[in-house]
Image (spheres, rainbow, N blue to C red):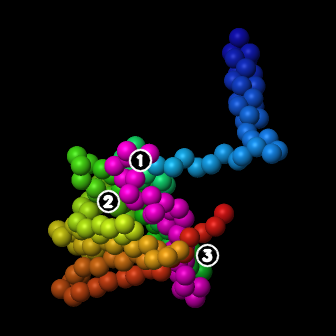
Amino acid sequence: MRTNSRLRGAALSLLILSCGPRAGQAPVTTPQPLATDPLGSLAWLAGTWVSDDPSGPRTVEHWMAPEGGTMIGVNRTTHAGQTLFFEYLRIESDAGETVYLASPRGRDPPTRFRAVDAGESWITFEAPEHDYPQRIEYRREGDGLRMRISGVEHGAAKSSTWAMHRLRD
């Protein structure tokens, strides 16, 4: 009996997979964020972004489109075939407030940054009590994205900026 139910499950999976678009039909598209999603205004951030500097480390950051009050992201920096840094990211709507949760190198619990300012194609998050950075900014500039982290580390002002372009599949 167990084998028959496995075969039926496999057959059903193949049937579902074969129901994709046929020649002449419109391809399946990525779902757009619902207009009522609390993070719908951040849809401009969704996608895969890659650093523009070919001579330095390569940073790739990917954000899923807003859905269900969350955006899920990952960031990885590589150079000379080695991973230098990675980070798991989330943007969430929490009790009407937009928060950015960063887990560098998978650290748990994540560091919480609160959205303090935003516009049509930019957003700024802050966590004044955090060691470094205390501020994270994303700004859409034409077809590109500028990411900037800043704050004070060991008593000195510090910042880093990444110019990114959208990776086309």
State how far apart marks 3 and 2 are (Cα): 29 Å
Left or right of residue 164, residue 14 in this image: right
- In the rendered image, the quadrant that contains the C terminus is bottom right
Which residue lies at the image location 79% right of the left edge and 41% below the top edge? 22
Residue 164: where, in percent of width, then height? 50, 76
Instruction: Tell me: 56 left or right of 134.
Output: right
In the drawing, does residue 3 fall left or right of residue 87?
right
In primary-sequence order, the first of circles 3 and 1 is 1
Whole-percent x and y of residue 125?
28, 67
Element carrying mark 2? strand
Q: At which x and y percent is residue 78?
A: 54, 75
Q: Nearer the viewer, residue 39 or 86?
A: 39
Amino acid tagged 1 = Ala
**Amino acid carrying mark 3 in the image:** Gly
Task: State whether residue 155 is above or below residue 114.
Answer: below
Q: Residues within 10 Å of mark 2 (few under 14, many from 20)?
A: many
Q: Circles 3 and 2: CB distance less than 8 Å?
A: no
Question: Which corner quadrant holds the N terminus?
Answer: top right
SS at mark 1 in the image: loop
Q: Would you name the residue on which mark 2 appears?
A: 100
Q: Residue 87 appears in which quarter of the rendering?
A: bottom left
Q: Which residues are magenta?
A: 34-63
100 is higher (above) or lower (below) than 121: above
According to the picture, the residue beneath numbered tag 1 turns out to be 35
Do the numbered discs 2 and 1 sit on residues whose CB atoms are within 8 Å? no
Q: Is residue 87 among the parts visible in the rendering?
A: yes
Q: How far apart are labels 3 and 1 at the CA level?
A: 41 Å
Tell me the distance, in whole angstroms, between the alpha carbons under discs 2 and 1.
21 Å
Q: Earlier in the sequence, mark 3 or mark 2?
A: 3
Instruction: Say which residue label 3 marks.
Output: 81
Residue 27 on the magenta span:
no
